[in-house]
Image: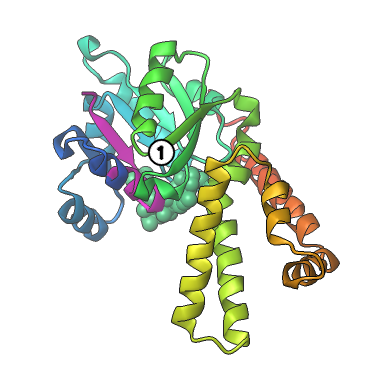
Amino acid sequence: MSSIAVLGAGKIGEALLSGLIRAGHQPDTLSFTERHPGRAKELAGRHGVDAVAVAEAAVNADVLVVAVKPQDIEPLLDDLSGSVAERPADRGLPLVVSLCAGLPTALYESRLPPGTPVVRAMPNTPMLVGEAMSVISAGSHASEDDLSLVEELLASVGRVLRVPEEQQDAVTALSGSGPAYFFYLVEAMIDAGILLGLPRAAAAELIIQSAVGAATMLRGSESHPVILREAVTSPAGTTIAGIRELEKHGVRAAMIDAIEAARDRSVELGRAHEGTGS
Ligand SMILES: NC(=O)C1=CN([C@@H]2O[C@H](COP(=O)(O)OP(=O)(O)OC[C@H]3O[C@@H](n4cnc5c(N)ncnc54)[C@H](OP(=O)(O)O)[C@@H]3O)[C@@H](O)[C@H]2O)C=CC1
Ligand SMILES: O=C(O)[C@@H]1CCC=N1
């Protein structure tokens, strides 16, 4: 089994560690790096995984998963480029997997030793419960074996799709950020229940179970979401009265604009590092 080091064990890095352990990866094949000793200790205790220095991970791990904020990538790349170059020849180059929104594989390739294989991956937080949607793209030195290894790794915590790298900003907006939009809608619907006088716990149970039921129907059905929605929408009934308000408030257009803005931000995060390569 490949040894995997997660560089930056924040929200998504910890979700990955936790998802991999849940999926049966042995904790002694995993490690992570963190800037704050307190957080490193807490995580090591929670998951039974070793906290290591970036230089140690860069020399020893087979796979380096980069999970820092895009704004923090420059110092990490500086550290990595020196340390990866110090790997013993018989270890070969590590496979670098970037989870960072917006950052192209070309950025890593321009800063790491020549030939370093890089895969860009965009997972999402449902990997915590084995239901991630992860999307992967190969950089110019990543082989089919590299891509398959990342696919296998991420398949242990959810579903995986391959796309050409130019689609990754759109992917980031749709499935990377997507869970946040569902959580936002659920929050808003629970608030509506409170407005209508239901206890918060009851409103939450009604909406969460409805979300799980709707998601299960979407996954299991050959039907388009429109057909499923029409089946709920009775003539002169309650649902159409609600749908009319959603249309009046431009909720569909707002969702399209929101996802377009997220895509644009992903592009912008990548552009911030243009010209920093050697
Ligand atoms: N959250 C999500 O749903 C998803 C996030 N991503 C991507 O994952 C990346 C991380 O996001 P997220 O987990 O939300 O962010 P977090 O800020 O929660 O996690 C990043 C972690 O990396 C640490 N860190 C920063 N620099 C270093 C370094 N040089 N060495 C070791 N640790 C370091 C940070 O420490 P400190 O606290 O000091 O900043 C922080 O704990 C981003 O690039 C994001 O685009 C991708 C898919 C989904
Ligand atoms: O908000 C972000 O930038 C990250 C990337 C996708 C989900 N969270």
Residue at 45 percent of width and 15 percent of height: 142
Question: Is 12 located above or below residue 152 in the figure?
Answer: below
Residue at 49 percent of width and 65 percent of height: 208
Q: Nearer the viewer, residue 56 or 223?
A: 223
Residue 135 in view (yes/no): yes
Disc 1 element: strand
Instruction: Assess whether residue 9 is covered by the magenta stretch.
Output: yes
Instruction: Say whether residue 168 is left or right of residue 77.
Output: right
- Counting from the top left corner in percent of width and height, residue 126 is at 43, 49
Q: Which residue is mark 1?
A: 158
In the current view of this chain or complex, which residue is farthest to the front? 235
- The span picked out in magenta is 1-17
Instruction: Say whether residue 161 is left or right of residue 14.
Output: right
- Counting from the top left corner in percent of width and height, residue 44 is at 18, 51
Residue 98's quadrant in the figure? top left
Question: Is 129 located above or below residue 112 in the figure?
Answer: below
Question: Is 60 located above or below residue 176 in the figure?
Answer: above
Instruction: Assess whether residue 140 is covered by the magenta stretch.
Output: no
- Counting from the top left corner in percent of width and height, residue 170 is at 65, 38
Determine if the C-beta at disc 1 is less than 8 A from ligand 1. Answer: no
Q: Nearer the viewer, residue 106 or 20?
A: 20
Instruction: Say whether residue 257 is left or right of residue 276.
Output: right
Residue at 29 percent of width and 49 percent of height: 34
Image quadrant in which the N terminus is located: top left
Residue 9 in view (yes/no): no
Question: Disc 1 marks which amino acid?
Answer: Gly
Neighbor class of circle 1 (other Cα within 10 Å; few <14, some 14-19, many 20+) is: many
Residue 232's quadrant in the figure? bottom right
